[in-house]
Amino acid sequence: MTFIQKLSAVWASNNSLLCVGLDPDPNKFPPHLQSQPDGIFTFCKTIIDATADLACSFKPQIAYFSALRAEDQLEQICTYLRQAYPQIPIILDAKRGDIGATAEQYAREAFERYGADAVTLNPYMGGDSIAPYMEWKDRGAIILCRTSNPGGSDLQFLNVNGKPLYQHVAQLVTEKWNRNGQCALVVGATFPNELAQVRAIVGNMPLLVPGIGAQGGDIRATVAAGKTTNGSGMIINSSRAILYATPDKNAGENFAMAARRIALETRDEINRFRL
């Protein structure tokens, strides 16, 4: 089953467009996990188990693991996801953007070492920075387009033949790069007008949408701007709002219950505006 097929199936089976981001920060863990050598794995596994039936994907952010020398725990997490929840896609948030043999190695890292179903990519170096990932025809290439950060406008609104650069990227991916039907785009929830513009360009291509929750994106506006005609087509990410839903980190085991509560509320709020 390809990434796109798996994603489409879980949109339906879990009735969810919610992606749970895995951005582990041990300083925010309950105390009983902060001293454990495998605390990152245990924390993420607990979040996964608490939210798996509410999610359409899980998105580990690789920097949070590599900065802590915890790549081995990321491998464990990805292995656990593939074994316990094989129907749920793993999106490795790496934002790779190199070319040639280096890009080939990054693709192997994402798809062989971690077994991810998809990886986020930076298109700044052009089509040959994306091409090595296209060789993995069952995997997804999720390409940065209109990002949720304010500084994204420094480049993404540059005029390219009468259009802002982000629209040029969306058109380029749609018309030239998506030959195997495995591409998706990253478009931030903080810019619903631009999200609607991208949807108009790409048709039913999936959109990974960060920016709700802690970043303040409006769910109603996001869904209205980005959904497809059948009320799907989006992977709406929430990370910190779910992971650290318990205001008191001393709450211990209750962090999983709090995470599930916020994930359920978020999924249901998204669903209110889908159809």
Image (cartoon, helix red, strand yellow):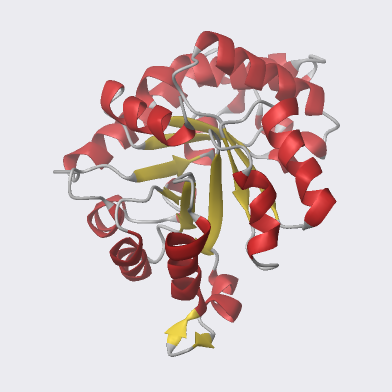
Nearer to the camera, 237 or 160: 160
Query: How many marks are shown on the rendered structure?
Result: 0
Nearer to the camera, 245 or 138: 138
> Can you say which quadrant of the picture contains the C terminus?
top left
Q: Residue at x 43, y 90 (%)?
A: 162
Q: Residue at x 77, y 50 (%)?
A: 103
Q: Position of residue 230 (x, y in %)?
A: 18, 43
Res 38 quadrant in image: top right
Q: Residue at x 80, y 17 (%)?
A: 35
**Residue at the top extreme, as displayed:** 84
Q: Is residue 231 visible?
A: yes
Q: Position of residue 56 (x, y in %)?
A: 40, 30
Q: Residue at x 49, y 63 (%)?
A: 176
**Residue at the left extreme, as displayed:** 275
From the viewer's perspective, tell me whether residue 142 is left or right of residue 174. right
From the viewer's perspective, tell me whether residue 170 is left or right of residue 15. right
Res 194 quadrant in image: bottom left
Q: Position of residue 105 (x, y in %)?
A: 80, 42
Q: Position of residue 190 (x, y in %)?
A: 41, 62
Q: Is residue 166 above or below residue 205?
A: below
Res 199 quadrant in image: bottom left
> Can you say which quadrant of the picture contains the N terminus?
top left
From the viewer's perspective, tell me whether residue 26 is left or right of residue 5. right
Q: Is residue 66 above or below residue 30?
A: below
Nearer to the camera, 37 or 160: 160
Q: Is residue 252 visible?
A: no
